[in-house]
Image (spheres, grey):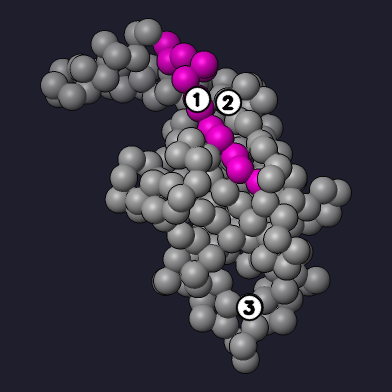
Amino acid sequence: MKYPDFFNTINTIKVKDPLSQVLGAFEGGEYEFSYLDVVKAAGHSCPTVAGAYIMTDEALNALYPNERAVRGNVKVEFEESLEKGVAGVIGNVISQITGATDKSGFKGLQGQFSRHSLMSFNKDINSASTRFTRVDNGAVVDVTYNPEPVKANPQMMQLMNKLGSGEATPEDVKAFGEMWQERVQRIFENRDVVVEVSEL
């Protein structure tokens, strides 16, 4: 399996999952997610998937300073509807890491470890933010993501047009993919520019 080398340089997100511990999946319920894990689940790497990963990492670091985040203990809210824009894509990444789902998630075990109804859309919050809330203590952070300062290679538009028209050569396809991932890499390298965290 070949993929861009920079995937391996991105920090992992470490979690503790009480359900996983009870069901014997991971000792102590401790495991971690890599960007590669998220890319496999999404099927691709793009600014949106990268942004969702960074947003989740920053939010969990703020909510759980100096300790592992507890999977299943974080509520996530979006201003956008599930069908609008890229909210669904972002939600899928966040759900994978935090365990939060809307109505489709795990219903619980003997009244514990429920994961459903922890993610919701069409909420009255800042439209530029995703809100993360710790269920146990009510701590809240809003995370805003804006990749616009990290510009794409200007040659990408020409190549995208060739892809759309069916005129792209194999060399064009390869060059486009390399330029695409180069921007994703720069987004990670400039995470302090593209993401803002506000503790409420």
- Name the residue at the top extreme: 154
Say which amino acid is labelled 1. Pro
Is label 1 in a helix, a strand or a loop? Answer: loop
Dominant SS of magenta comes to: loop
* Residue corresponding to mark 1: 147
Give the residue drawn at x 83%, y 54%: 67
Tell me: residue 159, above or below residue 36: above
- What kind of residue is marked 3? Phe
Front one among 66 and 132: 132
Separation of disc 3 and disc 2 at Cα?
A: 33 Å
- Specify few, some or many for label 2: CA neighbours under 10 Å numbering under 14, 14-19, or 20 or more: some
Residue 173 shows in the view: yes
**Quick check: 110 left or right of 3?**
right
CB atoms at circles 2 and 1 under 8 Å apart? yes
Q: Position of residue 157 (x, y in %)?
A: 29, 14
Q: Position of residue 175 (x, y in %)?
A: 38, 17
Tell me, yes or no, whether the two marked residues, 3 and 2, touch with CB atoms within 8 Å.
no
Percent coordinates x, y for residue 160 in the rendering: 26, 19
Q: Residue at 60% across / 30% down in the picture?
A: 195
Task: Tell whether position 92 is magenta.
Answer: no
Pinpoint residue 120: horizontal percent, then vertical percent. Answer: 46, 60
Q: Amino acid at mark 2?
A: Val
Residue at 42% of width from left, 71% of height from top?
103
Chain part drawn in magenta: 141-153
- Label 3 vs 2, first from the N-terminus: 3
Q: Which residue is mark 2?
A: 194
Q: Is residue 39 visible?
A: no
Closest to the observer, 23 or 117 = 117
- Spatial separation of the CA atoms under disc 3 and disc 1: 35 Å
Q: Above or below — where is 152 with respect to 3?
A: above
